[in-house]
Image (tube, coloured by chain):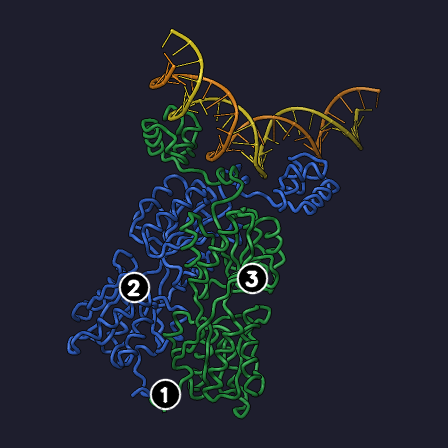
Chain colours: A green, B blue, C orange, D yellow
Amino acid sequence: MAQPVSIRDVALRAGVSNGTVSNVLNRPERVAAPTRLRVEAAIAELGFVRNESARQLRAGRSRAIAYVVLDAGNPFFTDVARGVEHAAREAGLAVYLLNSDENAERERENLELLHEQRVQGILITPIEQDNEYAAQLQRQGTPVVLVDRGAQDAAQCSVAVDDVLGGDLAATHLIESGHERIAMIGGPFSIQQVRDRHEGAARALARAGLPPLTVLETSALQVAEGRRAGERLVGLPSARRPTAAFCANDLLALGLLQAMTQQGLRVPDDLAVVGYDDIEFAAAAAVPLTSVRQPRELLGRTAAQLLLEEASGEPAHEHRHVQFQPELVVRASTTMTTLRW
Amino acid sequence: MAQPVSIRDVALRAGVSNGTVSNVLNRPERVAAPTRLRVEAAIAELGFVRNESARQLRAGRSRAIAYVVLDAGNPFFTDVARGVEHAAREAGLAVYLLNSDENAERERENLELLHEQRVQGILITPIEQDNEYAAQLQRQGTPVVLVDRGAQDAAQCSVAVDDVLGGDLAATHLIESGHERIAMIGGPFSIQQVRDRHEGAARALARAGLPPLTVLETSALQVAEGRRAGERLVGLPSARRPTAAFCANDLLALGLLQAMTQQGLRVPDDLAVVGYDDIEFAAAAAVPLTSVRQPRELLGRTAAQLLLEEASGEPAHEHRHVQFQPELVVRASTTMTTLRW
DNA sequence: TCCGTGGATTGAAACGTTTCAATTCATCGG
DNA sequence: CCGATGAATTGAAACGTTTCAATCCACGGA
């Protein structure tokens, strides 16, 4: 195996000093052309590759930001990540993608890892309302931006979509379609998005003078949990069974859809379904899914920009809270077409 | 903001030397209990967090491996990644997840980044058949394991699923269902999986004495491309139009499904569809999708184990090529049920 | 009392880079 | 011909950790 090649080796080979090689690498314009060529040749011949750890150590911080995601299996987050990467690439920074898997302990481990890595900043969609460790990182000088989550205190930037409004939109749509017994499927309620979306839906029902939501709490926001909730729903006596369900995300809605089909119930005739996120697969679902769309890439891009702005160290940085508006996308899962009658 | 805290600061505070603090961190059993407690207290009081760059620099390599993925938007890869993370966590290593986005240039950039980071090893699903840069990394001592891709030469380990067999299974199923004009949708053909799956399907057709596949080449393995292919397919004169389509992955198949629905064609009556990967959304699709299932997590876990084995530096390491068998999962997209007549 | 033993601790070197003050050297104006 | 100028280059320090040979010290055995 080739031995590790350092700047020193390159310098010797090119007959110059350490510093000159470094200058070729970082400020080539300061180096006379013939010297530069000689150094570049030596680099190529030896196959020299910078040691990033050494750079970081010297610089005091890494050339990367990180995005800590709630559930990498949810296409919503991969779309947000695309936006993040886009913004980071423009700034010449790498992005570490870490997955908390809806697990507080893993989230904590991820943050510790990033702290040790001295990343320039962290984007995170936290599990709990407030993440104490993240707040601590922020205080110690590592900027943290909350993604898809409104910050309560003003101590950190945040980029979010108005989830209360989203829940309201979804429920209002169902109410206007004539539904009166409406279920909310989602959980755990420790996740703020779940609470907000529930709050919005509950608000809409109250406004319409309807009975409160039937809440089916799930233990995760995933397809399998949606299926399970569907089975519970089917088990209810039909007189009390809701005629419509609002799911806290599309994964749950897709699982619910599967359960309905399996149990021989029809969507939307027996049960109307609204999802949340409008992931790519929602439109391709068994019954194309009505869903609440969020500007995913924009969310990621904006969050990264906010982070970079804060990380660039402007002393007068003001924490900002950007909020986008969600948008209802109506599809077959809530509209009984004459075709289906 | 808190000033950075180094081992030195902790040592001063605890009234011991640098080395002792390091020992508390790395071999606590060598340190007398009272001393250890004092050091631990100092660490807590100062909020000391190890600087990973310095550790890496000293150690000569990082405590991480990386998984360079073809398309992070494809749930197939997130599932594989789960397996990778699982194995890596057991070994106490972090996993960097990088996305090539089906783009050779980004793939290259990702590998360069990892080279500079001196990661312990790299898992990659490369775009082109052979990745010269990856081979070079391997020669320079950074182990590289190919994921979901059989290595041609014996210079690297690989973990793959028999894609030729998978293609064969899919096509055979269609043939046995009575189809004779069969299309293959997939691309670009620079991706080996696409070629292998095509080869398997072609083999099955030849064996049955049927006319060759109608190939609709796509520029990416994504939903939008599937839709586009569907539109092309519908445009064919119906006498020549295939009655079944085998898609190189589920994303394409889901897009195809959408296009069919939009154009008013029925699946499987007008067109039977087989996908590949059996991602979670395949079962929840408009028409539940027949697909070729791969053991995703197992793939990731095995690949990571192979990598760790090689990275642990056993001199007698033999490159291995593990191959798993795919499995056909039949669903509604290829079976005309009497219900649908 | 002295020596040997071994556990605990120390102190300095080394990892590879960047940075910056110091140095060299050629050139140009006077 | 001298001194000033400034571009090019040098050399050493510093970043924070780990490691390891060296040192210290207490204790038990002779």
Q: Residues within 10 Å of mark 1 (few under 14, many from 20)?
A: few
The answer as to whether the residues below labels 1 and 2 share one chain is no
Q: Position of residue B169 (x, y in %)?
A: 29, 68
Instruction: Tell me which residue sits at (38%, 78%) in the image.
Output: A288
Instruction: Tell me which residue sits at (58%, 48%) in the image.
Output: A141
N-terminal of the pair, mark 3 or mark 1, is 3
> Which of these two is toward me, A261 or A272?
A272
Determine the secondary structure under disc 2.
helix
Q: Position of residue B27 (x, y in %)?
A: 64, 41
Measured in 3D between alpha carbons, the distance from the residue under mark 3 to the one under mark 1, in whole angstroms, is 40 Å
For residue A78, side relative to residue A127 (left or right):
left
> The residue under label 1 is which amino acid type?
Thr
The answer as to whether the residues below labels 3 and 1 share one chain is yes
Mark 1 chain: A
Mark 2 chain: B
**Is residue B131 placed above or below A8 in the rendered structure?**
below
**Is residue A289 placed above or below A56 in the rendered structure?**
below
> The residue under label 3 is which amino acid type?
Pro
Q: Which residue is mark 1?
A: A337
Measured in 3D between alpha carbons, the distance from the residue under mark 1 to the one under mark 2, in whole angstroms, is 43 Å
Q: Which residue is mark 2?
A: B165
Q: Position of residue B39 (x, y in %)?
A: 70, 42
Determine the secondary structure under disc 3.
loop
Q: Quadrant of residue B210?
A: bottom left
Q: Quadrant of residue B258?
A: bottom left
